[in-house]
Amino acid sequence: MYICSERLIMKYHFDTSLGRISLQISKALGKSFEHKTIHEGFPLRADQWTLVSLLYHKGALTQKEIADSLYMDKVAVSRLVERMAVKGMVARRPMSNDKRAREVSLTPAGNRLYRKMEPLATKTIADALDGLNEETISDFFSKLNHIRKNLQC
């Protein structure tokens, strides 16, 4: 590490790479969650859960809004929405003001799925944060949000 213009600058190194570590944590959370869903008889992938959770908390969104919220490309969102529509978890409909845009919302089955899966998501997060006290967790999320804001374009 070195200081440049009164800012602490970390020299890139693979072992301390923020991108690598955050990706590993994200992948590990997804795998842990998927393992729990399979064990409970709800084989749901982490990206599918993320879509269900997003729509449950934010309501109907366009596919572009979903892509922006989840940092996914439009093609990946389209495929994800299609898979979840086939499963009957989401519904798509053209927007009244723009026929090219599609609004995506949870179906009643999607809402029920969220309510069944939310305890598994809570357990996954609790397992990941095990051994950390409330103050440390709050500080940790505050710092993560700070980093995310620094990176927004």
Image (cartoon, grey):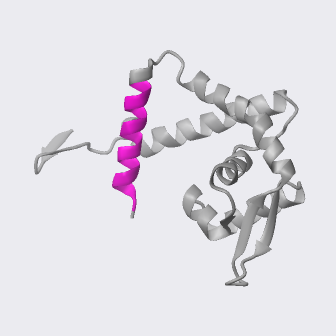
Above or below: residue 95 compared with residue 80: below
Relative placement, left or right, of 45 versus 30 is: right
Asked if the magenta segment contains residue 139, the reply would be yes
**Position in image of residue 33 (x %, y %):** 70, 33
- Decide which of 112, 64 is in the foreground and name it: 112
Left or right: residue 101 versus residue 44 is: left
Q: Quadrant of residue 74?
A: bottom right
Q: What is the residue that sits farthest to the left in this orientation?
A: 5
Q: Is residue 109 magenta?
A: no
Q: Is residue 44 visible?
A: no
Residues in magenta?
A: 136-152
Q: Position of residue 117 (x, y in %)?
A: 76, 36
Task: Kindly identify the residue that appears in the image at 41 percent across and 50 percent down.
Answer: 148
Q: Position of residue 120 (x, y in %)?
A: 72, 30
Using the image as rendered, state which of residue 22 and residue 107 is in the foreground.
Answer: 107
How far across and how far down the image is residue 71, in percent? Answer: 55, 58
Does residue 138 lie above or below 21 as drawn? above
> Residue 121 appears in which quarter of the rendering?
top right
In this view, 112 is above or below 124: below
